[in-house]
Amino acid sequence: MPPVEAVEAENAQLRMENTVLREQVAWLRRKLFGGGQGERIDDTQLKLKLEEMEARLEEQKTRKVSYERKVGRAKKNEPPKERFKDLPVRETVVIEPDEVKADPDLYERIGEETTFEVDITPPKLFKREIVRPKYRFKPERERPPVIAPAPPRPVEGGYASAGLLAWVVLSKYMDHLPLYRQEKMSPRWGAYLSRKTMADWVETVAEWLKPIYNYMRRSLLAGDYIQADETPVRYQDPDTKKGKSGEGWMWLISRPGGDVVFDWRLSRRHGELTSLLDGYTGLLQSDGYGAYDRYDRGNDVTWIGCWAHARRKFYDALDNHPREAGRVLALIARLYAFEKRYREEALDAPTRQRRRVSEQRRILKWLHVVIRICSRRALPKSGLGKACAYALAHWKPLCAYLDHGNVEIDNNLVENAIRPSALGKKNWLFIGSPQAGERSAIIYSLAISCQRHGIDPHAYLADVLARVPRMTNQQDFAPLAPSHWKTLR
C-alpha cells in the first residue's frame, strides 16, 4: 500500500490537472459557441465589479468603460431616414389621389408628404464601343490613312475594362467570392465569364499594381513606427505536395494613418521577419511572438507590446477566476479610458507622452503588483496562470508605449486590417499556389489601404488600372498610392 504522502501528492496533482482541463474545456466552448473572439471584451468590462479595489482606486462599484472603434457601424436602432440619408435619389414617383385625377380643376395643391423606399440595381455587364475614325490626307491621297492609336488596356488585346477587372478582384478579396462562384454568377450579370480567364485577370492586376505596392512598402520602412502582425493561410503546391496543402503566412506591416502592406511568406520563422523589415530601425509594435523579440535584440529597434493581447488572456480566464481576472481587467480598463480621452482631446505626440507618464505610470505599478500576486496564487497551467506569465514576461515592451507619444497602446489597428483576409480564407479555403500568395498580398494591400483612407476601393482600382498602362517604370508611382490618391483626383 503506498504511503499516505504519495496518495495525497497524487490527489493534489489530479485535482490540479482536473482544474486546468475544466478551464480549457470552458475556453474551447466559448470559442466554438460564444459570440466572438477575445475582442468582444468591451461589453463584458461594463459589468466588472471592482470589489476590494473600490477604496484604493476611488471608483464606483461598477466601472463602465467603452472602447472607440475606428470604423463606425450603423446603430441597430438608428431610423432608416438617418441610415440612408446619403443615398442618391435616382427616381421620383408622384402619386395623385383618384379624386384629383378625376377632376383636377376642383383642387389646389397645399403641400405634400414624402416617404422613400430603398431599391437596388443588380450588376450588369455592358459593352463600351470605342470608335476610331480613319482619315485620308486630301492633298496627297497616297499617304497612309490617319487613325488615333488604340488606348492601352490593362489586359493587352483583351476585352476587360479597368472597371470589370476591379470588380472581379474586389469580389474575390473583399467580398470573399471565389472565382468559381463568380463564374456561376456571371450569366446573371449578362454574359458568361470563364474562371480561368478571371484567374488570368487577377494575375495581370497584381502585376500592374506591384510598383505602387513596392512604393507603399518602402514608404513604411522609411518611417520610425511600424505595427506588425501575421496570420496563417493554407496554400497548394502541386510540385511538392500532391493533393495536400501547406501552411503559409500573410505578414502585415502598417502604421496609424498610413497605408497597409501585406507580404506573403512560406513560414513564420525569425528570418522571414528579418527580410520583411529589411533593416528597419525605429519603433516596432506587435504581439508577444518571439520573432519580434529576437529582431528587437539584433537591431536598432524598440519593441512596443500590445495591451489588447494581454487583456484578452485575462478575459479568457474571467469565468474561472472572476475576482482576480476582474481586478486586472478593471485596471487595464483605466488605461484605455485615458487613451480614449487623449483621442477625444486630439493631443499631439509630446503632450500625450507627458500625460501618459503623469497619469498612467502609477496604474501600471498597481497592475504589476496585482498580476504578481495573482501569479503566485494561480496554477501555472490555468488560464489565469498563463495570462499572468504572459504579462510578466512581456512587461517591458507592454510599458514601452509610455515613453513614445506617437504610438498606440495596442496593435488593434493592424489586427483590424488583417481581418478581411481571415474572413476570406473561410470561403476560398486555400491559395492555389505559392506564387498566388504574392498576388493576394498585393491586392489586399491596396484594397485594405483604400478602406483605411475612406476611399471606395472600386473607384480607386478602376482609376489606377486605367492609368498605369500609360505609365513607364521611370515615372513616380507615389501619387497612385491610396494615401495620396484623393489629392490626385
Image: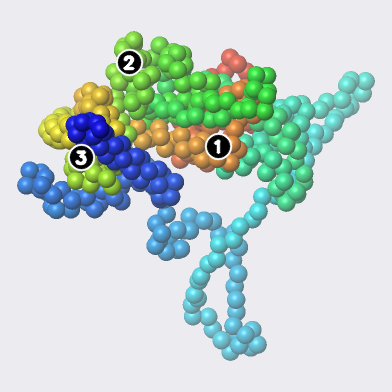
Quadrant (top left, top right, bottom left, bottom right) of the N terminus: top left
Where residue 142 appears, as percent x and y from the top left, is 93, 20
- Residue at the farthest front position: 1
**Amino acid type, mark 3:** Val
**Amino acid type, mark 1:** Lys
- Residue at the farthest right position: 142
Q: State whether residue 263 appears in this view.
A: yes
Residue 30 in the figure: left or right of residue 240: left
Where residue 360 appears, as percent x and y from the top left, is 16, 34
> Given contact means CB atoms under 8 Å apart, are the residues at marks 3 and 2 in contact?
no
State the residue in front, 59 or 186.
59
**Amino acid type, mark 2:** Asp
Where residue 391 appears, as percent x and y from the top left, is 25, 30
State the residue in front, 153 or 286.
286
**Which is more N-terminal, label 2 or label 3?**
2
Which numbered circle lies on residue 296? 2
Dot 1 falls on a residue whose secondary structure is helix
Q: Residues within 10 Å of mark 1 (few under 14, many from 20)?
A: some
Residue matched to label 3: 328
> Given contact means CB atoms under 8 Å apart, are the residues at marks 1 and 2 in contact?
no
**Which is more N-terminal, label 1 or label 3?**
3
Where residue 83 appears, as percent x and y from the top left, is 45, 58
Q: Residues within 10 Å of mark 2 (few under 14, many from 20)?
A: some
Dot 3 falls on a residue whose secondary structure is helix
Q: Place residue 143 in its image quadrant.
A: top right
Residue 55 in the figure: left or right of residue 466: left
At horizontal 32% and vertical 15% (from top left) the residue drawn is 296
Residue matched to label 1: 425
